[in-house]
Structures are given as C-alpha cells and as structure tokens.
Amino acid sequence: MTNRTFTMIKPDATLKGNTGGILDMINKAGFRIVAMKMMHLSAEKAGEFYGVHKERAFYGELVEFMSRGAITAAILEKENAVEDFRKLIGATNPAQAEEGTIRKKYATSIGENAVHGSDSDENAQIEGDFFFSKLEQF
Ligand code: ATP
Ligand code: MG
C-alpha cells in the first residue's frame, strides 16, 4: 500500500498538551486519518516497536521515554504519504528541522522529538498492523 503511512504522537507532546496542534498540522497538510487511538505503551511494547534500534546506545533512553506517557497512534492516507509525511515532521534532531515542520515547532531534543513517521511503505504497513487490526483501519 503506497498511499499510507503510520505516525505516533510521542509522550513529550502528549504531556505538553500538543496533540491537538499536531493533528491540526497533519490535517492542514492534506493527510486523511484512517485509524487512530490513544494508549500508554508498556516498556516492553515500546521496545518491541523500536526493536530495530536495540543495539544503539540510546535504546534504553528511547524505551523509557516512549513509555513515560500516552501516545496517539494513527494511520494517515495521502498521495506519496511516507515521503510527504517525513517532510512534514522534519529532521530527527529539531535543531536541524526546517521552519514549518512539526518537529521545528514541537520537538525539544533529538530524543524527545514529538512525533514518529514511518521511513518506508513496508514499515508503514508493519507499524500500522502493530497497533491496528484490519477492522480498525478504514
Ligand atoms: P522516528 O523513527 O521516531 O520517526 P527518526 O526516523 O527520525 O524517528 P530514528 O533514527 O529512526 O529517527 O530514531 C528513532 C528515535 O530514536 C528518534 O525519533 C528519537 O526519539 C530516538 N533517537 C534517535 N537518535 C537518538 C540519539 N542520538 N539520542 C537519543 N535518542 C535518539
Ligand atoms: Mg525512524
């Protein structure tokens, strides 16, 4: 499926009350929400989601951060969704994120960067299926 991507609004953004502002930017950029839920990840679930980074020095910090508060998970639909969404969120490190991006506006550091976006069509599918059953994807 090439027209969908997966996103999470991360705990830093949730705890600062930025969920609505981020969803507004997503809507204004032309993405349609086709699945959405709010949940508090266990450390185990957060670690499983970011399993690809298991060997990285920041993995423990990442798991602690992602299980610190609630996240909002969503599947988004738009032409060229994966690439366009990565452009909308901006660079991993907010210091390098361009003006007008979600991370420029809402992220505070390379670790606490407000939002996740899938990096490929294949991962978008895997990540969406991690959170949503077929019945929950519209
Ligand atoms: P995401 O996958 O969350 O969209 P990304 O693709 O921009 O982010 P990745 O390299 O996949 O970046 O890293 C995943 C997440 O791990 C980052 O978003 C950030 O929260 C955390 N992270 C990455 N690098 C560091 C670092 N050097 N120090 C602390 N945390 C980091
Ligand atoms: Mg990534």
Image: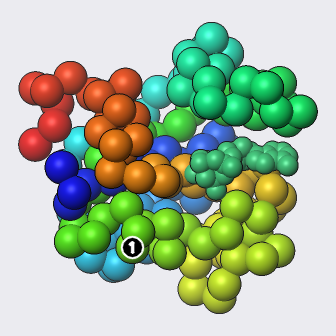
State the image coordinates of residue 133 (x, y, percent, origin top left): 20, 23
What secondary structure is marked by label 1? helix
- In the picture, measured across the screen, residue 32 lies left or right of residue 54, that is left
Residue at 49% across, 66% down = 86
State the image coordinates of residue 2 (x, y, percent, origin top left): 22, 57
Residue at 55% across, 68% down = 89
Pick the quarter of the image with the C terminus.
top left
- In the picture, measured across the screen, residue 124 lies left or right of residue 119, that is left
- In the picture, measured across the screen, residue 86 lies left or right of residue 96, that is left
Which residue appears farthest toward the right when viewing the image?
57
Q: Amino acid at mark 1?
A: Asp
Total marks shown come to 1
The residue that mark 1 highlights is 84
State the image coordinates of residue 21 (x, y, percent, origin top left): 50, 67
Please indicate, yes or no, whether residue 13 appears anywhere in the rendered image: no
Q: For residue 35, what is the image quadrant?
A: top left
Front in this rendered view, residue 106 or 76: 76
Residue at 67% across, 16% down = 43
Please indicate, yes or no, whether residue 10 appears anywhere in the rendered image: yes
Q: For residue 25, what is the image quadrant?
A: bottom left
State the image coordinates of residue 58 (x, y, percent, origin top left): 85, 35
Front in this rendered view, residue 122 or 133: 122
